Image: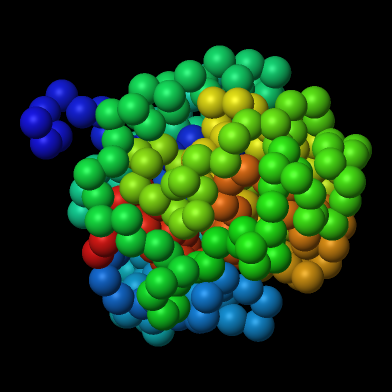
Amino acid sequence: MAGAGRPAPTCLLLGAAGGGKSLLARRLRHIRRGRGHRGGPGGGAGGPGGRWPGGGREPAGSPGAAEGSGARVRPHPAEPPVPQVGTNLTDLRLPRKVTVRELGGCMGPIWPSYYGECSALLVSGGGGTGTSPGGRAGTPVPSHGPEGRSRPGGGGGGARAQGEGLPRGWGSAPAPAALRGVGPLGFALAFVVDAANPTQVSSSCVQLLSVLSAEPLASVPVLVLFNKIDLPCYMSLAEMKSLFRMQDIVSCATQPITMLETSARDGTGLADVLQWLRAALGDPR
Ligand SMILES: Nc1nc2c(ncn2[C@@H]2O[C@H](COP(=O)(O)OP(=O)(O)OP(=O)(O)O)[C@@H](O)[C@H]2O)c(=O)[nH]1
């Protein structure tokens, strides 16, 4: 029964308007497999990995591709932001086909109507190797909070009292076994934050909390991307974690959460994003 009629693994791409989702999806489509992974686990401060493979350029013909040879990535030219109204589908070959479904930031109020898709994929997903990204060198590491922690719904141990200050329903779902590691569930979620826009931090944080507390998404692996780190005014991973109170979020979340710094403009961290997608969606390569 393997594969017959099974929908492609899907990653929902969410985040506030202007965070860089569209550019990110376009750039991911053109990144080449196999080489060019740089940086250590988490791709975090001091070592974000994954500019264009081969230390090189975006492939010819792709947005921002350069003529001739060059050792460095040619940044994607700045372009006026065009708010995404509706949903955009991008197919990636990792080599298994993975669909990235971007939902425009201005569609925030109706994002939940797309969460149901996840239930179908969770039911029909599986069948992978169960590879955990944390188990391979150089792979982004999901955060599960303190070792052996109990989720708030399961009796405490977290940094804050149960459910305190968090959206209704937070932590109330039972912990599925899959949460112990990022599993091949067939559905994943990436949440993009503009790390160069301090005015968006609080609204992004509220959005992230509401996404994490959505019941259909209770067991999907989540990647939080702090994007636009090419800009001089960007906030570092440590700053963003502190502003978002990520430690609290991670310790209360039912999902395994991974964080990465990226620049959709210059390609930093994008190889790590692909690697996370491969691991989260069940492709061991
Ligand atoms: N400097 C810099 N600019 C970026 C980066 N990513 C995206 N941008 C720019 O930010 C603007 C918004 O990017 P989009 O990709 O349209 O953002 P979005 O999240 O899809 O926005 P919505 O469709 O409104 O939800 C565009 O001008 C992009 O070129 C980045 O990593 N660095």
Name the image colouring. rainbow
The one nearer the camera, 156 or 182, is 156
Position of 102 with respect to 193 (left or right) is: left
Position of 41 with respect to 63 (left or right) is: right
x then y, percent, for residue 281: 35, 48
Indicate whether 112 appears above or below 259.
above
The one nearer the camera, 140 or 229, is 140
Farthest front residue? 155
Position of 94 with respect to 147 (left or right) is: left
x then y, percent, for residue 247: 77, 60
**How many numbered marks appear?**
0
Instruction: Look at 56% across and 72% down and name the residue there.
Output: 43
User: What is the quadrant of the C terminus in the image?
Assistant: bottom left
Instruction: Look at 44% across and 32% down and name the residue there.
Output: 101
The answer to whether residue 211 shows anywhere in this view is no
Instruction: Look at 65% across and 83% down and name the residue there.
Output: 46
The answer to whether residue 260 shows anywhere in this view is yes
Rendering quarter of residue 278 = bottom left
Instruction: Look at 83% across and 37% down and name the residue there.
Output: 163
x then y, percent, for residue 135: 41, 72
x then y, percent, for residue 1: 9, 31
Indicate whether 32 appears above or below 225.
below
